[in-house]
Image (cartoon, coloured by chain):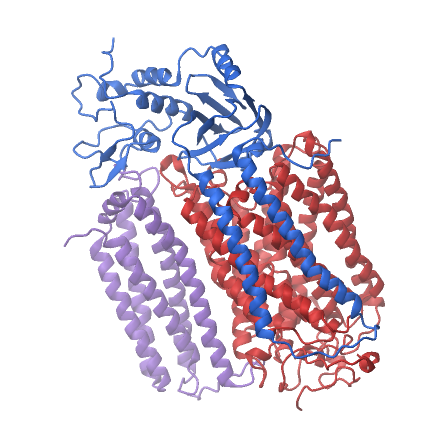
Amino acid sequence: MPEVRPALAEQFDSLEQQHEAATLGIWTFLATEVLFFGGLFTAYVVYRFLYPQAFAEASHHTNLLYGTVNTAVLLTSSLTMALAVQAAQEGRNRALVRCLAATIVLGIGFLLVKGLEYREHFAHHLVPGAQFALTAKPKTELFFWLYFTMTGLHGIHVLAGIGVLSVLAFMSSRLNFSSEYYTPVEMGGLYWHFVDIVWVFLYPLLYLINRHL
Amino acid sequence: MNATETAPCADVAPEYGHESENYLHQHTIKSWLLTTDHKRIGILYLLSIIFFFAIAAFAAAIMRLELLTPAGDLVHSDTYNKLFTIHGVLMVWFFLIPSIPAVLGNFVIPMMIGARDVAFPKLNLLSWYLFMMGGACALYSILVGGVDTGWTFYTPYSSTYSNSHVVSMAAGIFIAGFGSILTGLNFIVTVHTMRAPGLTWFRLPLFIWSLYATSLILVLATPILAITLGLMAVERLWGIGIFNPHVGGDPVLFQHLFWFYSHPAVYIMILPGMGVVSEVITCFSRKQMFGYAYVAFASLAIAFIGFLVWGHHMFVAGQSVYAGLFFSLLSFLVAIPSGIKVFNWTATLYKGSISFETPMLYSLAFIGLFSLGGLTGLFLATLSVDVHLTDTYFIVAHFHYIMVGGMVTGFMAGLHYWWPKISGRMYPEKAGQLAALVTFIGFNLTFFPQFVLGYLGMPRRYHAYPPEFQIYNVLSTAGASVLGVGYLLPVIYLIWSLKHGKIAERNPWKATGLEWKTSSPPPVHNFEETPVVGEGPYNYPRLDHEDLEHA
Amino acid sequence: MKFPILPEQASTTAVQVDYLFWFLTGLSALLMLIIFGPMIYFLFKYRRLNLVDRHLPDFPTHRIEITWSVIPLFIVLGIFVWGSSVFYSMARVPSQGLEINVVGKQWMWHIQHAEGNREINELHVPVGQTVKLTLASEDVIHSFYLPAFRIKQDVVPGRYRTEWFQATKTGTFPLYCAEYCGTFHSGMIGRVFVMSPTAYEQWLERGQPGDSLAQSGERLFRELGCSGCHMGNSTIRAPRLEGLFGKPVPLQNGTIVRADEKYIRDSILLPQLQITAGYEPLMPTFQGRLSEDQLFQIIAYIKSLGAKTPQPLP
């Protein structure tokens, strides 16, 4: 397996500069994503404040088991991702591929559980629209709109992340990352952790309001 | 190859690059549409924004013709409403926001910092394609009937009542917005990581500081616009009840979300112009910028405080008195750094050696018009006065003074200043000066009467109006025709100059700055070797009158 | 062609706002002079071919920068304080005043006086008296703008806004909608007629309204079946409304709200939102069955219900 001779893009003067640019680039991108999700979170917080009872009741109809399982799945996937980045840095290629595969599998698992969840919501008439069932309180439908929009947007990001990780896995099968160059894995890792953190905020807001165990 | 300490007056042979390999030498469509060269991308943007400007200006022309008479007798009310909406949407998102950053910023920033390109050239091309896709959606929306909500898309009119093509227009803005986010991201990373050795932050030209501050806003504010328009579109398509009061939604929440982006957006639409002015004033007075660090920090201060004033668009919209007080106070504060810039530019002229080429004329016009526009901003920050003036023509005049008198004038200044670098040709100087003068006169005649109209009480977005307002409307329309001529002239002579203009030397203005070290037009990679910087910007020599002949 | 320069100044607020406006104009002119006087002088004196002394002394840059930052800061803070105090007096609606209801809808203004007189796009008021306008919208956001009085408030659907003025001279003054609201936004204009108090009384009587606002409200109250639960002997237990207006109401979720216009309106349109403590959420919604005008009438009726028991219903 050939050593990775990282290509130095012609606009850069050194590998170090290229790496610095990539790192700052991904962090700036993640900042824009924070603002992006932030708008939705703001709308959610405003209406949660205005209609607390409706939101509490609607939130009781989310599937706590699926939500908690998904939280565990994503947190574990962040662990495997971190291990992947470490493996890349240490040049342990097989471990890298295995960890990436595990992360991808966990990501797909997350989406599958989400799919089951959405199917259940559909069956229980919790999808906003003509068939929406929880009409007792005025804003329960809005809760579910925000629920689907926020988890849907997050799901798209998870899917994109799976795509990125698949490309990384493919790259690792052709090249050997090492401490000299493992930038793509590092950047992919940062993105994946971000997707995880967004879920860490979504979970309590959507599933845990007023939940008494 | 080393330092950049060339005496500005000396005629130095091009140190870097060879003319036969300048960036324009390839002519195929593919070389343009698949380019990753920041210079070519800048030109792609230039052509696209002129296209959208033309459509938006045409809409304005019809509006001003309609407003010649009090009665709404030229076009139907719905058509008029669509015209001012299209004018606003295209001018804001498809002309002003990209203008200096995506055209001049793309072209100049890498050269100004001694780099061969931006940090992510392919992302740069993607930005342009996103801009074009967004533009295509916007054009589609116009062609199938247009939008009549105003560029501000207030709910519930936009989300429930309007019968126009809101969603496709919102989609267009949404997509183009991602293009501008990526441009901002590219600039931030480029300025942080690709400065030439020795080019510390406080040796950077002020154009870079201005564009850096602009990029921060682009990156942080635009995502909010995306979500806001998205929520509005979803409300419109599926009635989710977020902005519809009949089901407990809050229409004013839309305004908070919208203006949280759109106020910082107006700083996107002025900071780059300020950056151009700093470059031009120093060059054409042959002088160091007075208070360089203060001007640099003022850009950052404007960007930061600009995020905290959005409620001043909503003083009568239904927010609490205390919110009003907070936003009013902060709106006054944001005036201070702008004032600092104006004072520093003026002080730079003191004991300079001043010439009046076209870029300088536009820059001086910028300072005057921006100051007037900014002072009228004080009127609007004053709560009690704003109650009377908001939603009238006073507002229209205020923002046109800043955006047209300020930003567009700054864009013209920059375009003329860097034209030799971009095209390798000089524009005809007398024609440039004439156009600047015509524009200045036309602009004031168009928009100053609108301040009077606003104070008299004429509301904005009025298709027909009471007869007592007619005189000022007639003056304004007359001015608009002059302004139109003023903007048409550069189109003509700049195109003319491509074939017939004098061949430009490497540094026709004898300016400092790394971009003037390369040939005009520059080679594909700007610099054969990364330059090393040993001094700060604007190091024009001290002047005694004996040096004037060479300055 | 008419060449107006100054708008009419016809209210107490207008006087205060105009002082501020002209001060700002004078200040702006002065500042423009201070900046552009020297600038034009420099442009002339230091033009390229003029041979003058350009020797640059050392400037105390920091001190200069601080000075021209701090002085403008104090100026703008002064304007802020002045402007805010005027604004505060505008925003604090006087407790006493002639109450008139305004409903904006695409594309006209419906105005209802308490006595029952109704107007469309016209507002008759007496001079020298405080007039309090309660504003509601049937559809989109409008804005009720009286330039001669220098007042304006956005009229937002789903809530009530208030505006007040005291006219200082008689005459006819313009009324405009100032928030873009669709096709005939520029047609949503009218006139305010300020009259002497006697002329106003005469106008009210001439209008022969028939029912006052409260009487119309009472009729609606009966016709829509509200009295069925809220009055008399009913099997449904519903909160009594006599003397309710203005009092605190404890809610089911433990909070206490004041029974103002907004509370009454929300209770009629979104009854599930705020359940009175100790009651069941049984009230149906009247969303879509009542216009904003009718809501004003019902509210006027409920306001008129003092602590006394109303007459038994026929």
**Front in this rendered view, residue C273 or C37:** C37
Residue at (51, 55) in percent of width and height: C77
Left or right of residue B25: residue B380: left
Left or right of residue B412: residue B137: left
**Front in this rendered view, residue C72 or B124:** C72
- Where residue B256 appears, as percent x and y from the top left, is 45, 49
C221 relative to A112, above or below: above
Residue C92, picture quadrant: top left
Quadrant containing the C terminus of chain A in the rendered view: bottom left
Chain C colour in the picture:
blue
Residue at (72, 71) in percent of width and height: B350
Question: How many numbered tags mark residues here?
Answer: 0
Residue C221, picture quadrant: top left
A86 relative to B88, above or below: below
Residue at (64, 85) in percent of width and height: B531
Colour red, chain: B
- Where residue B285 appears, as percent x and y from the top left, is 74, 72
- The reply to whether residue A186 is visible in this rendering is yes
Colour purple, chain: A
**Front in this rendered view, residue B156 or B541:** B541
- Where residue B537 appears, as percent x and y from the top left, is 64, 79
- Where residue B208 appears, as percent x and y from the top left, is 60, 72
